[in-house]
Image: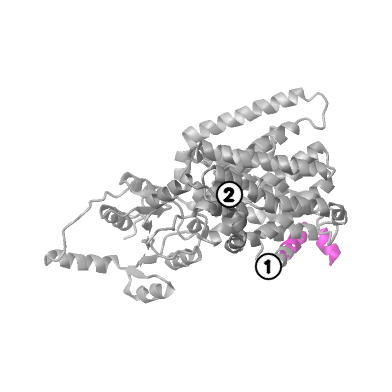
Amino acid sequence: MTEFVTGSAFAQIAALLAIASVIGLVGVLLRQPLIVSFIVVGLVAGPSVLDLVHAEHEIELLSELGIAVLLFLVGLKLDVGLIRSLGTVSLISGAVQVTATTAIGYLIALAAGLGSLESLYVGIGLAFSSTIIVVKMLSDKREIDALHGQLALGFLIVQDLVVVLAMITLSALGVGTGDEGSAGDAVWVLLAGFALLAFVIVFVRFIAEPLTDYMARVPELLICFAIALAAIFAAVSDIAGLGKEIGGLMAGVALASTRYREAIGSRLAPLRDFLLLFFFVSLGAEIDLRGLGASLVPALVLSLFVLIGKPLIVMSVARFMNFRKRTGFQAGVALAQISEFSLILAGLGLSLGHLSKDTLGLITLVGLITIAVSSYMISFCSSLYKWLEPLLGVFERANPSREIAAEGKKAGEAHEIVLLGLGRYGTAIGLRLKQRGLKVLGVDFNPAAVRRGRSHGLDVEYGDASDPEFVRHLPLDGAKWVVSTVPVHESGVVHGDTRVAIVQALKDAGFSGRIAISSHRDAEVADLLAAGADLVLEPFQDAADQAADLLTGHAEQTRFDIEPVAGEIQDG
């Protein structure tokens, strides 16, 4: 059996997936993030335990594609407008957090006997927190839109900017590592970098919006295009000597300013998680578990700094930014782990000869400890705060002006109605609700419907309402109703009755308001109500009732004339 598994690449990957499923199930039972399970899979499949990784080329290929997709998703968040919206104070505060964490981590690593360059890698690695874990766990707790969730996301965006700089620096350090007289190579890489940046600027300015508008007519084609763009940019960047990571990152930046980035990001998240398994497997193949014993004490010390010291740094920064101590504590706990990027940077450092395998093992062990422990800290954050509150008085401000202003702004921007589907019927509902003074957010994955909704003055987002990952990121806090006019025949992530899938996705996202679903058949009403809808809208029946009221003088005559857009999906 062992010879069969180690002799066939397909059999090895099948075995890895089976092991990942078993360990992942155990992780779920222990309430652990998937990344912890993947790291364990890498260690178990490595040479120290099962020694399953012999198809190095195939696994390395999947690993590199996973890193390209991961960095593409990071680049997808780096919209210039979003960065500007953080404000100077937020950017400086995030930079202070990264700098302070890096410096203290560097000193701890030096004290543990590591060299200067290895200590710098460790320090930088400790500064990053896992976007995947923070977003997932805060979303599960329905706190991603809370003030501390937004504060944590602000720090994560700054960390992502640092990731960009770190990747560029590593690429520069890696130029000509195996050749003498690498000045010509360095010049070539520098020119290639400027050429790639210039192309991205031209792409964003003239190509991205019209091209994605066309691709978005078929959501599956848009996702295929996004993956292709990430892979092509990564390949071209690698050929030019910049590394695949920079290419994947720049591909994401190229699409970051389009209206489709949220939809692309939500669709690619499962693919990213799947491919990252192979990154952790390839990482585990480099680590000898027998050598981790010597790293245990330094790993525990560094882990305690991440789990305790890092939140204290975040709380200090939050106090400076005029937030309450509770908000700073919750944001600090959310960031109390190191990131998958820490491991990616460590892997790059190993490939460049900057790190030893022992140091790679040390950083991996810190990642395993901090991610595992922080997941429980996030889950029981409220209980931790009640226990520690008497000790946190130094972090409280007498006048938390920034928090008060942020709460007021958030309350003013909340949408009371989220409207899924912007065909003629949906748009008419949205306009009438807006006329009555309600704040409405429209959602549709038909670009023509999105443009039309915006032309009528509605707030509109592009996205597939049947995609649970996209629904998680909708601003549902404060919404009293979610109204779906999406028809049964509309294509999406799921097949079958998309209306039932939408209801389930809203329930899973923790939406506590009321749900209205449209239907054209009386026979469906009972089933939709049983599925969780609070109200079923029947356009023909409702229109007949309204017509009767108008004819008999029982209703006010109010009408909008909405011009159809050529090629739009009609929803009755």
Q: As shown in the figure, which amino acid type bears the numbered disc 1?
A: Leu
Q: Is residue 368 left or right of residue 446?
A: right
The front one of 229 and 358 is 358
Residue at horizontal 42%, vertical 66%? 499
For the residues labelled 1 and 2, the Cα–Cα distance comes to 33 Å
Q: Can residue 351 be seen in this view?
A: no
Q: Which colour scheme is used?
A: one colour
Which residue in the structure is indicated by mark 2? Answer: 395
Image location of residue 85, percent across then percent down: 48, 40
Q: Is residue 451 above or below residue 41?
A: above
Position in image of residue 537 (x %, y %): 31, 67
Q: Can residue 13 be seen in this view?
A: yes
* Occupied quadrant, residue 378: bottom right
Label 1 residue SS: loop
User: Does the magenta portion include 339?
Assistant: no
Neighbourhood count class around disc 1 (C-alpha, 10 Å): few under 14, some 14–19, many 20 upward: few
Q: Which of marks 1 and 2 is nearer the N terminus?
A: 1
**Residue at coordinates 47% horizontally, 51% vertically from top-left?**
218
Label number found at residue 540: none
Could you tell me which quadrant the N terminus lies in? bottom right
Please check the rendered image and state whether residue 10 is part of the magenta-colored stretch, yes or no.
Answer: yes
Q: Amino acid under label 2?
A: Phe
Displayed quadrant of residue 388: bottom right
- Which residues, given as a range, are shown in magenta? 1-18
**In the image, 421: left or right of 10?**
left
Q: State left or right for residue 395 relative to residue 276.
A: left
Nearer to us of marks 1 and 2 is 2
Q: Could you tell me what secondary structure mostly forms the magenta stretch?
A: helix
The residue that mark 1 highlights is 30
Q: In which quarter of the image is the C terminus?
A: bottom left
Do callouts 1 and 2 mark residues in contact (Cβ within 8 Å)? no
